[in-house]
Structures are given as structure tokens and as C-alpha cells.
Image: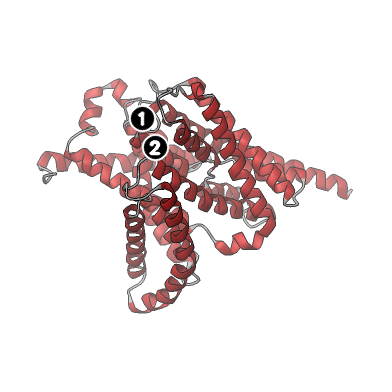
Amino acid sequence: MQNLDHSEMVNLLIQLGVMILAARLFGELARKLHQPMVVGEIIAGVILGPSILGSIDMDIYEMLFPVSGDTSIVMEGIISISVVLLLFIAGMEVELDIVIQQGKKALYTSLFALFIPLITGFLISYYSPSLFNLDASDDKLVFSLFIGTTLSITALPVIARVLMDLNIFKTKIGMVIIASAMIIDILGWIIFSIILSMMGESSGALTVGQTILFTLLFTISMLTIGKSLINRALPWINRSFSWPGGLLSVAMVLCFLAAAFTEYIGIHAIFGAFIIGVALGDSEYMSERAKEIVHQFINNIFGPLFFVSIGLYVNFVTSFNLTIVVTLIVLALTSKLAGAYIGARLGGLKKFQSLAVGFGMNTHGTLEVILGTIALNSGLIDKEIFVAIVIMVIVSILVSAPLMKYTLNLSKKLKDSKAK
């Protein structure tokens, strides 16, 4: 790639400005409607993309967001970095102490909420590929694993926001949901890293078995030895470097090096970023204030760029397939609810509490969209399935909080009636 010429540089800067501005405006609108800002950011991309702007004036759309040329290559690189950074801060939200404290409740809830959707999605897509317009020549095994993983992952950042909005973040149910979501995040991304290798997203130097081995070794070593080394290094960093710039620089260095390492050994870069985020965020010397600075830096710049980009190059009107959309939504909501409910009941929670946990765990979000984007770019899925995944994510975000609130109110009324 040559250096960008004058007009290409102007176009790139305009793209970035328009994307961030639109993300902020629609994100704030979503927030005023009591929805996560990510919903507004995705809608902003749909409006700026071929679905709305392109249908109104294709010339303006193609001028603003060219799909080829040096500008698009640079933008693609920026979006890739954004994905890595989003997984980094998602990892920082995992607190291993909370997972351990919840013990059996979190373990049962997470395992059932992970594997029931995973198995359900796999079996239905494998034995009924026509529901997803899958051709006989396509790789049903990898595709079915992808669908199962998409249904099983839970949106930890969105769940945390919902729980805080309902003022139950630090309650017993809130901690069970958060701890379970943390376990699912770790296990889900280990599974996803294996799928990436099967998709051909690895370097080709490793077999699937070697990829599994390296994934497990990397995860275990980073959460034990790596975490210990970070704990020892952070006090010196906080003393020796200016704050918060020094800590922010070190965090970014660790993120990119871990991402580069996992990409090099054949596991996707996002997995390295996620695991190093867990190790760094769980350190006793990584203060909440420092985490908030990293979150604000990424969430308000790189996060919006990625979520707006979702709608920029996919036509949500022409790629809308009602059968696939309804299938994914029904599978996602029912399998996750059933899995989380069964797990919570086995963990010792009561009926309505378990239902509340099920609705809380039913929130999909950032990770599913990232997974879908990678699968679309690799050719594993088509635009119709990608659009269905994004719609499924939005629907799950919209319905989870009201259903959870309703169930908790029923639980409280039942408890009050028994007390009388």
C-alpha cells in the first residue's frame, strides 16, 4: 500500500469524524430511551450504510465510505484494532474472585447456560441446515459449531449495565449472573478460538489439536504466572511512570503483545487480548479508577467505530431473511433461558430467582457481533445470517431487562405473601 494521497486522507478523516459523531448522537438517543448505547451505535451504522443512505443516494454513500482502495484498507485496520481493544476491556471486567465466591451456583448456571444453547444450536443447524439456507457443499460441522457458540455466549458488559440499572448488581442474584457470565466468557472464547482454527483463520502451522493445547496452555499460564508477574510489576509502574499515562501505555502494550502472540501461534488476536485483559483487570494493583480510564478511552473512540462499521457495508434491507431471523431469535432466547434456569435451580436458587437469572443471562451483545463479523469476513456465513445475528442481539437487549424486572417483582410479591 502506498501513502494516502491528499484526497484519500481527507476522506479518511471525514469518515472517522462522521462515524464517531453519528455513534455519539444515536448512542445518546438510545441512552435516553433507557437502552445501552451500543444499540444506538449499531443503528447509526445502518443509517449511514447501504440500507438507508445508500438507498437514498448511492453516490454520496460510496463517496463517504468507499469499499475498495487504500482508504478502505486503512479503515479496515482501524476496525481490526478496535475489535482487539473491545475484547481487552471485556476481559478486564472479569473478576475471578467473584467467580470463586459464587461457587456451585455460578458453576452450574454457567455450564448449563453455555452448553444447552451450544448443543441446541449445533444440532438444529447441523440436521436442519435448510433453516439457514446452507448448501450441501458447505462445511456443516464448522458452521453448526459457530451457530451453537453464537447462541451460548453472554454479553457481560450489557448484563452489568442492566443489573446496575435495576439496582441488583451487588445482590445475590446479581452476583450469580455476573459470575456465570464471566465463566461463559472464558469458556466461550476458548471454544471460539478452536472454531477459528477450523475455519482456516489460523496461520496453518498448527493442527486443531495443537491449537486446543496452545489455547489451554496460554489461558492457564496467563491467569496464573502471567497474573503474578503483572501483580509484581504494577506497583513499580505506578511509582516510576506518570499516572495515568504510564499505566495506560503499559496496558496497551500488554494488550497488543498478547494479541500478536495468539495471532502468531494460530489463535485469533482477540483471544490474546481478552485473556490478558482478565489477568490485568484481576490484579489487586489495577485500581477501579485506572480501569475506568482505559474503558473510557476505548469505549468512546474505538468501540463506536466498530459498532458503526457493522452497518456500513451490509444492506440490512436486502439481506433480511425473516426465517433465519426468527429461527435465531427463538433459539437464542429459549435455549439460554432453559439452560440458565436449570443451572440456577440445580445451584440452589428458587423458581422465580432462577427465571430472573435466565432472563438476565439471555442478553447477547458485543462478543456475538464480533464473532459474526469475523465469520462473515472469513466466508463462513453470508450477509443474511450476519444481519440475523445483529437483529437477535438487539432484540435480546431490548427484552431481557423488562422480563427480568417483571420476574423479580413476582418473586418479591411471593416472598411478601408468604411473610404475611
Q: Residue at x 73, y 48 (%)?
A: 346
Question: Which quadrant of the structure image shows residue 249?
Answer: bottom left
Question: In the rendered view, would you say 215 is above or below 138?
Answer: below
**Residue projecting furthest to the right:** 420
Q: What's the amino acid at mark 2?
A: Ala
Image position of 102 (left or right of 304): right
Along the line of sight, the residue nearer the viewer: 58 or 274: 274
Examine the rendered structure and indicate whether residue 326 appears above or below residue 33. Answer: above
Q: Tell me where residue 44 appears, x and y as whole percent.
A: 38, 35
Q: Which residue is mark 1?
A: 47
Q: Residue at (50%, 65%) from the top-left corner?
A: 282
Residue identifier under label 2: 375
Residue 36: x and y in percent read: 49, 43
398 on left or right of 246: right
Under tag 2, what secondary structure? helix
Q: CA distance from mark 2 to mark 1?
A: 23 Å
Q: Nearer the viewer, mark 2 or mark 1?
A: 2
Q: Quadrant of the N terminus?
A: top left
Residue 26 appearing in the image: no
Question: Mark 1 is on which residue type?
Answer: Ile
Q: Tell me if 99 is positioned left or right of 207 in this view.
A: right
Residue 58 falls in image quadrant: top left
- Report x, y in % for residue 328: 53, 29
Mark sitting on residue 178 = none
State which tag comes first along the sequence, 2 or 1: 1
- The crowd level at tag 2 (other Cα within 10 Å; few <14, some 14-19, many 20+) is many
Q: Nearer the viewer, residue 43 or 196?
A: 196
- Mark yes or no: residue 112 visible: yes
Using the image as rendered, state which of residue 157 and residue 134 is in the foreground.
Answer: 134
Residue at 62%, 44% (x, y): give it. Answer: 113
